[in-house]
Amino acid sequence: MERRGALFLGLCLVTAGSRTADASGESLRWMQRMEAAARSRRPTSPPEFIHGLEQRLLNATFGGHNLTLQTRTIQSLAFRLGCDFAGLSLSSSIMEWVPQEGYMVTCVFWKEGASQHYWGVWSPEGCRTEQPSPSQVLCRCNHLSYFAVLMQLSAAPVPVELLAPLTYISLVGCSISVVASLLTLLLHVHTRRQRDSITRIHMNLHASVLLLNVAFLLSPTLAVTPVPGSVCAALAAVLHFALLSCLTWMAIEGFNLYLLLGRVYNIYIRRYVLKLCAVGWGVPAFLVLLVLAVKSSAYGPRTILLSDSQGNGTSFQNMSMCWVRSPEVHSVLVMGYGGLTSLFNLVVLAWALRALRRLKAREKAPGPRACRDTVTVLGLTVLLGTTWALAFFSFGVFLLPQLFLFTVFNSLYGFFLFLWFCSRRCRSEAVAEAEMEAFSSAQTVS
């Protein structure tokens, strides 16, 4: 810090309690001590002063929504935060008192536990400083999120040091899945030969996965303060609809697999794919509209709970995304819905493996068809159900491994479906080529 021209601005965002009536006066006296210590250059540790100010502000009582305490060079702001907190616009009158000499303004936050010798350090990590005018400073901080938060069973806070790698994995995985899903849909439009019901079901699943990944990538961006709350709530509803659609099309894939392997001949369902579309898209839309009609506040900015390296559950980085905020809606229409889907697909997987085992046992030797069917069932059902069941292991010692496994596998879900589509297409082309060769050989012999 410089001498007199230095500006020491402490921005403390806390949820105010009500313990002692004289706590705000004690906070102000502590700030005066901090200012005096800075002028006299005493050997007292600055992090020690900051930690003491934080504890006193936690005990402060005030009417209204905020409290501002300031000395000549220090200003502290305390806020009473509600459930819909999505960010703050902060201002400081101390800027007018500082002489216009050379100094640099930087947006930082107090990162507790980041230093081995002190309680923490001021860190600009994830924040960008902009200065539109000499008397105005704009802080733009990243809103990070990870894919596993969509179906996180436990409300336990995530270690703050793991948020960045989980976010990068989610961004890379979802981006790859978006490209893969788009490519798959374009290949389907270009290929006019394969328009059977199985392929159409696959394409509807790809469409729901594409919508899910795009909505998730937009969610942290639209959770920032300048964006109206209604926009964030609308995106949260779209994201919920996309997740429910994805889960529903998984169940439809399992149901269709049951019909294919059930050896049911001469079965005909009029407008089969159209009816499946009514279920795959209509049921999620009805559920989301029902939530909006009953409790529209269920959607909006949702804060991601973080814990520092000391495990005290506090962090001054605001991590939020547009998602379901109601615990009841999340429990029933996210975890409950996903649980039923995963359970159904696992039951279909077990039944299909048993049916294929019986088929293989009736053959004299392991035939290629039985092996091919086994690979088909394993590939399809693993991609459409098993990895999503990891959501129900997000507690206790399983929490951290589950977060990484769920984020890796399910953010790349669209890419895995793309590989499945390519293998199925190559297999159909190989079968068609073999049939053409057999037909040509028969024509030559005759």
Image: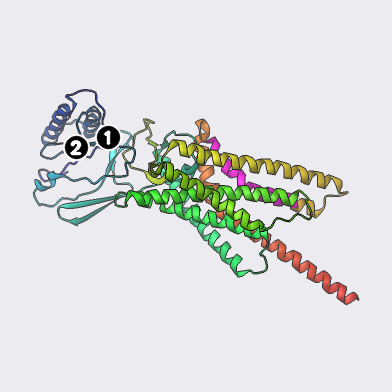
Question: How many numbered markers are drawn?
Answer: 2
Tell me which amino acid carries mark 2.
Answer: Ser
Tell me which amino acid carries mark 1.
Answer: Val
Residue at the extreme top of the image, as rendered? 20
Q: Which residues are magenta?
A: 373-393
Q: Is residue 51 magenta?
A: no
User: Where is residue 45 shown, x and y percent of the image?
Assistant: 22, 32
User: Where is residue 371 shown, x and y percent of the image?
Assistant: 77, 51
Secondary structure beneath dot 2 equals strand
Which is nearer the eye, 167 or 321? 321
Pair 1/2: label in front: 1
Which is nearer the eye, 193 or 187? 193
Residue at figure coordinates x 73%, y 56% from the top left: 268
Which is nearer the eye, 345 or 112? 345
User: Where is residue 229 shown, x and y percent of the image?
Assistant: 33, 48
Q: Locate residue 199 relative to residue 289 in the image: left or right.
A: right
User: Where is residue 429 shown, x and y percent of the image?
Assistant: 71, 66
- Find disc 2 in the rendering and name its residue: 76
How dense is the environment of label 2, judged by Cα within 10 Å: few (below 14), some, or many (20 and up)? many
Residue 125 lies, with reference to residue 398, above or below; the image says below
Residue at figure coordinates x 46%, y 50% from the top left: 239
Q: Is residue 375 magenta?
A: yes
Residue 194 lies, with reference to residue 254, above or below; the image says below
- Find disc 1 in the rendering and name its residue: 14
Label at residue 247: none
